[in-house]
Amino acid sequence: MKTIGVLTSGGDAPGMNAAIRAVVRSAIYYGCKVYGINRGYKGLLEEDLEEMNLSSVGDIIQRGGTVLKSSRCEEFKTEEGRLKGVKILKKYKIDCLVVIGGDGSFNGANKLSEMGFPAIGIPGTIDNDLEYTDYTIGFDTAMNTVIDAISKIRDTSSSHERVNIVEVMGRHCGDLALYSGIAGGAETIIVPEMEISSDEITQRLKTTQKRGKRHSIIVMAEGVEKIGSANDLKKKLTEEAGADVRVTVLGHVQRGGSPTAFDRILASRLGSRAVELLLDGKSARVVGIRDNQIIDMDIQEALSMKKTFKKDLYEMAKVLSI
Ligand code: ADP
């Protein structure tokens, strides 16, 4: 009988609970023992873990956040820290670990595998910044949160004939801004992957103003450094296009909320596959989804893949927002 450890690490994402539930339930179904490690690698180093049973994960599939809590842990980046972690895992006779998190957390899992401790990664981040998988757990929910906000902002933007800049998360990845911008019918989408000057944005606004459109939604990813902050852009549009501009920074609201059906199903499928891989004696793998098929891949290979931006979608959005 194997003993599996499971933890959530890095930025939390809606759907992590559904993944924990899937790991715990499948592991128990296959006769394994499961330990839930609280607060990611930090909790591991502090020996903050407990055995989980079927009811530990009851009533959590619909809940945002992570019942295991999450954190960042500098100590785990050191070899000394990781050796301590492996020692604690062995003390509890844990044979292998499931890490739910983003690329940083995967790096930790990779290092553990290199030290001979089997680990599997499940992608949990609202950023959708991992190339090897079409979607990460939490992205769909965050996107729907942004769309909901855009729809509400659009109502008031229209009443007051204002320009609204909506800043969304995503770190260096523009997926959340791109997808929610398309679904929210934004007039302009600004992402870190595509060059766009503030002059061009001003020009676009003036063009729409000329044809009588007095309100506009600009979705801006947080990682766009070249044109400055949303407030810098507001200043420019106010001064040069004479627009009444408001900025809404959505912030952490995007990280919470009940996961969508898509995220719950994705998390359930990925959690189940992770356990199957461990039972097959696999290690140093990550699970993901491609063309609606659950896949697994070498963790180092996955981490070395550079995220590609969907330029075709970006161009399409430009056409649809003339
Ligand atoms: P995310 O997993 O969301 O990308 P972070 O990048 O903050 O979040 O990583 C989460 C945690 O993973 C870090 O706080 C650290 O404990 C661990 N980690 C990140 N990079 C490494 C690394 N190179 N080696 C070991 N552990 C790492």
Image (cartoon, grey):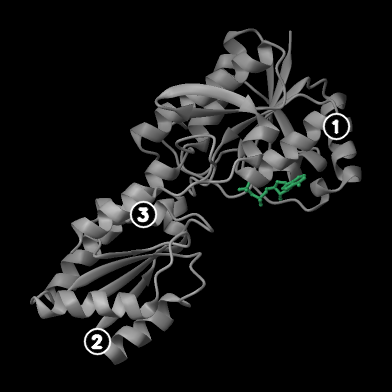
Q: Nearer the viewer, mark 2 or mark 1?
A: 2
Using the image, tell me which numbered label, if any, was put on residue 310. none
> Residue at (82%, 50%) from the top-left corner?
75
What element does badge 1 sit on?
A: helix
Q: Quadrant of the N terminus?
A: top right
CA separation in Å, label 2 and label 1: 59 Å
> Residue at (21%, 57%) from the top-left corner?
319
Q: Which residue is mark 1?
A: 86
* Residue 97 picture location, percent across and down: 71, 27
CA separation in Å, label 3 and label 2: 24 Å
Q: Amino acid at mark 1?
A: Val
Q: Which residue is mark 2?
A: 241
* Residue 310 picture location, percent across and down: 40, 47
Residue 54, visible in the rendered structure: no
> Quick check: 24 left or right of 36?
left
| Between discs 3 and 2, the one toward the N terminus | 3
What element does badge 3 sit on?
A: helix
Whether disc 3's CB lies below 8 Å from ligand 1 is answered no
